[in-house]
Structures are given as structure tokens and as C-alpha cells.
Amino acid sequence: MPTEAVLPESELRSRVQERIKDGRLPVEFITLINGGFGGGQTCPVCDKPVTRDKVEYDVVDPRNADHLIFHFACYVIWQRECARRIRAGDSER
């Protein structure tokens, strides 16, 4: 099952930063992840569907209990940015 990024890493990182800034993504360290075959939902980072031939990473947004469905690379880049901001005490959370 492929896990390659759907966009270049620099583009994904830029999108994560933008979506955190505008409130579409939370700054949270996620401790519970559900994974499985993609169901076609749109990834909140790359805006592309997580198709059946990909693994989806399903997390619950602690702000509103909505499910966020990510591609692997998108999830990893989002969590790296969250960790960076949390360590730095970034107020843009």
C-alpha cells in the first residue's frame, strides 16, 4: 500500500502552516490514531482524496470532535509542525 506524499514536502509544510494559522487545523499532539484503507474523504492538508489504495490516518479534532482524515505524509508533516510549535510555546495554537 503506497504511502508516498501526494505533493512535495515543502508544499505540504506550507499548507499545514497556513491551515494552522487560519484555524482549519489544530495545534495538538495526537495520541489516538485510527488507521485503515482510504475511504475517499478529502485530506485537510493536500485537499486530495485518501483513496482505497492508500492508508488513511483518522484523528479526532479535540476542538470540535470532527474527524480529520490524512494521508500518511500529510499527517506526519502536520504533527511535526505541531510539535515544533508546542516546544516553542507558539501562541498561534
Image (spheres, rainbow, N blue to C red):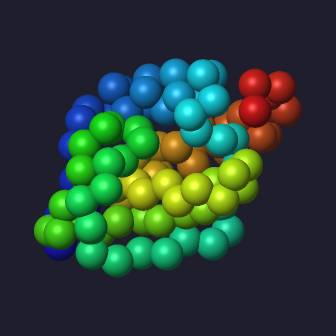
In which quadrant of the rendered view does residue 60 lie?
bottom right
Q: Is residue 57 left or right of residue 82?
A: left
Reply above or below: 93 against 33. above
Image quarter hosting the C terminus: top right
Residue 69: x percent and y percent? 42, 57
**Looking at the image, residue 64 lies above or below residue 18:** below
**Is 17 positioned to the left or the right of 39 in the image?**
right
Residue 74 in sight here = yes
Q: Estimate the x, y position of residue 9 in percent, counting from the top left.
A: 33, 35
Q: Is residue 17 visible?
A: no
Coordinates of residue 75 in the picture (x, y in percent): 46, 52
Q: Quadrant of the N terminus?
A: bottom left
Q: Residue at x 24, y 50 (%)?
A: 49
Residue 31 falls in which quadrant of the image? bottom right
Q: Residue drawn 34% across and 77% down?
A: 36
Q: Can you say whether 82 is above or below 66 in the image?
A: above
Q: In this rendered view, identify the residue nearer to me: 82 or 44.
A: 44
In front here: 14 or 69? Answer: 69
Q: Residue at x 47, y 43 (%)?
A: 77
Q: Is residue 24 above or below residue 14?
A: below
Q: Nearer the viewer, residue 86 or 42?
A: 42
The residue under the point 24% across, 36% down is 7
Judged left or right of residue 82, residue 87 is right
Q: How many marks?
A: 0
Where in the figure is residue 72, as x and y percent of width and height? 36, 58
